[in-house]
Amino acid sequence: MSIDFSQYDPTSLSIPAAPFSDPSIIPHFEKGSVPRHVGVIMDGNGRWAKERGWVRTEGHRHAEPVVFDIIAAAIEAGVRYLTLYTFSTENWNRSPSEVRFLMGFSRDIIHRRVDQMNEWGVRVRWSGRRPRLWKSVIDELERAEEITKNNKTIDVVFCINYGGRAEIADAASAIARQVAAGKLKGDRVSEKMIAEHLYNPDIPDCDLVIRTSGEQRVSNFLAWEAAYAEFEFVPELFPDCNREVFWRCIEDYTHRHRRFGKA
Ligand code: IPE
Ligand code: IPE
Ligand code: MG
């Protein structure tokens, strides 16, 4: 199906005006109980559009305001790192027109939202592989990273051309280069060393992964960082999500008992 992109009007969708809710509606989370790092697998856009008889890309378009509602929710809950699965290494297998839409759309969102994120105290980060990713997307991501680099309220990581296995393979390659250069002994490779060669080594492990749309799988998200994460699978399709859905997941997480292998 061909899509007429000239009809695409990014300003037609409602967006949250401010990151701050009426304080009376923000749930009270016990100090120290909120996950430091939350990852979100934003899934179900295509099905949401299909339910309405629309093309899949309409679902992606309607996801934009939800992304910013979730960022606002994370700020209000006191989450320090939020990782958003935006485009996976497997998503290249979609139709050329959908891939083209997702690339252009990601680039445009970063461009038109960078000032808003900057005002909110967001430090924009990118996690993913360079080869194959559109240069214009990388340029916007790097520009946003530069503009927001001193912000400290929350780090928002956009995973674009990201795969958990690709990230580990890339770390292994970097380490192998050091071994080949004689800087490191091959039998001295440790978990710590691999963690230090991930795309954003300063970001701590993921505490909670939320996946929308009812699917209960990982789909190559944060294979290393979420090795000990808690999971929340919510039935809502991503375009139907909002900050209440996010807070519900945080609230549920606060009742989890994480053992990390201890008895
Ligand atoms: C998530 O929604 C967005 C991306 C993976 C880019 P989908 O496009 O996967 O929507 P469904 O899962 O097909 O409904
Ligand atoms: C995971 O969703 C990738 C993103 C949300 C970016 P998919 O829709 O691509 O995953 P599968 O195909 O259902 O596993
Ligand atoms: Mg999907």
Image: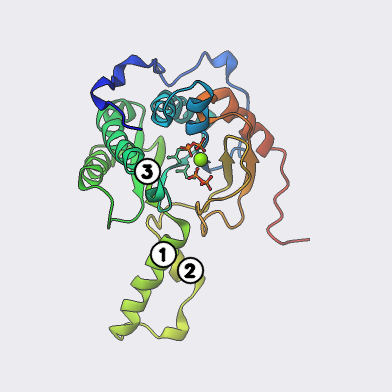
Question: Which residue, as the protein is rendered here, is positioned at the far right?
Answer: 263
Mark sitting on residue 95: 3
Residue at point 41%, 67% (across, down): 169
> Which is more N-terminal, label 3 or label 1?
3
Provide the secondary structure element on which disc 3 rests.
loop
**Quadrant of the image for the N terminus?**
top left
Q: CA distance from mark 1 to mark 3?
A: 35 Å
**Contact, CB < 8 Å: mark 2 with mark 3?**
no
Mark sitting on residue 192: 2
Residue at point 52%, 34% (across, down): 44
In this image, 258 relative to 87: left or right?
right
Question: Which residue, as the protein is rendered here, is positioned at the far front?
Answer: 1
Q: Is residue 192 above or below residue 101?
A: below
Provide the secondary structure element on which disc 2 rests.
helix
Q: Amino acid at mark 1?
A: Glu
Displayed quadrant of residue 248? top right
Q: Which residue is mark 1?
A: 196
Residue at point 70%, 50% (across, down): 258
Residue 216, image x, y percentages:
63, 45
Label 2 crowd (10 A; few <14 / some 14-19 / many >=20): few
Residue 81, image x, y percentages:
46, 42
**Contact, CB < 8 Å: mark 2 with mark 1?**
yes
Q: Amino acid at mark 2?
A: Lys
Residue 242 visible somewhere in the drawing? no
Residue 106, image x, y percentages:
32, 37
Q: Is residue 27 above or below residue 105?
A: above
Residue at point 66%, 39% (across, down): 253
Label 1 crowd (10 A; few <14 / some 14-19 / many >=20): some
